[in-house]
Image: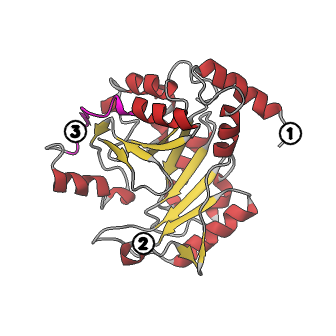
Amino acid sequence: MAESTKIKDYDHTINFWIGCTKFSEGCAHCYAEAMNKRYKWIPDFSKITRAKGAWKIPYKWQKQAASTGKIDLVFGNSLSEFWHPQADKWRAEVWKIVKNTPNLIWRFQTKRPELIVDRLPEDWGNGYPNVWLGVTVEMKKYLHRLDTLCKVPAVAHLLTAEPLLEDLTPQLADHVNGLDYVWVGGENGPQCRAFDMQWARNIRDLCYQHDIPFTFGGPGGVHQRNACIDGVKYASQPRHLETYRRMMQPSSKTICTLGEQIQLAETEARLPQ
């Protein structure tokens, strides 16, 4: 389960396992479950199932990216919950892959940030230089997820407010400390719930006030392709992406060890911006 992705702003998506259990209102019309019903990958979507063909493909992406000096973005486990307890027995294999693909930046998204700390590798430290951690918040009552995520050391903490089901402001302002990026979007699919463009405007304005990169993915439904707010397209990335690209340039097109990456990251942090 790996491919060149249709997920905006990412070069690849990969699923080391498939399946999930519904957790909150944002899961009601789960796109991954709907896709599984269509393609019949696994018989029971609530039972996490190891994927067979994904495990060697990242090394191919790494070789291709390193050969051209690129940094590719990978969205990890778009059809599952990366931190789900049912997948604990396989996650160490993923960390090995991540450490050996320095030309790939990996993003792992969750609605369950409380699961992360106990499932990080022993050498995580302040975060692997090529891993972004993200959390989904669809309603105000789940803003505490942001606080939990941002307490986990990482090079970038990301918020996805999609499918956004209500305005997160003004309360969101009390939860952005340590946040590096915000994505806002509506719900897709035939059962998509209503989206108010004012929600996107409010979050955009808050991000600008706090100097947080902001992307609008679209209002969902039949208007999803109109990813603009009042005629303006908002598309950005965490600032860490450019920092990492610069970090990877000094000595060669690829850095082979995690230790070298960490050393360069520490040097980069001391340089004037």
What type is the residue that disc 3 sits on?
A: Lys
Comes first in the chain, label 3 or label 1: 3
Secondary structure under badge 2?
loop
> Residue 266 appears in which quarter of the rendering?
top right
- Magenta region, main secondary structure: loop
Q: Which residue is mark 2?
A: 224
Crowding around mark 2 (Cα neighbors within 10 Å: few <14, some 14 to 19, many 20+) is some
Q: Provide residue 216's location: percent of width, then percent of height.
A: 55, 66
Q: Earlier in the sequence, mark 2 or mark 3?
A: 3
Range of the magenta residues?
45-57
Q: Residues within 10 Å of mark 1 (few under 14, many from 20)?
A: few
Q: Position of residue 33 (x, y in %)?
A: 25, 53
Q: Residue at x 27, y 43 (%)?
A: 19
Compared across the picture, whether 35 is left or right of 164 comes to left
Cα distance between the residues tagged 2 and 3: 31 Å
Residue beneath disc 3: 47
Q: Residue 272 — which label?
A: 1
Residue at image position (17%, 52%) is 39
Of the numbered discs 2 and 1, the one sitting upstream in the chain is 2
Residue depicted at 46% across the width and 72% down the height: 219
Foreground: 116 or 250? 250
Asked if the magenta segment contains residue 55, the reply would be yes
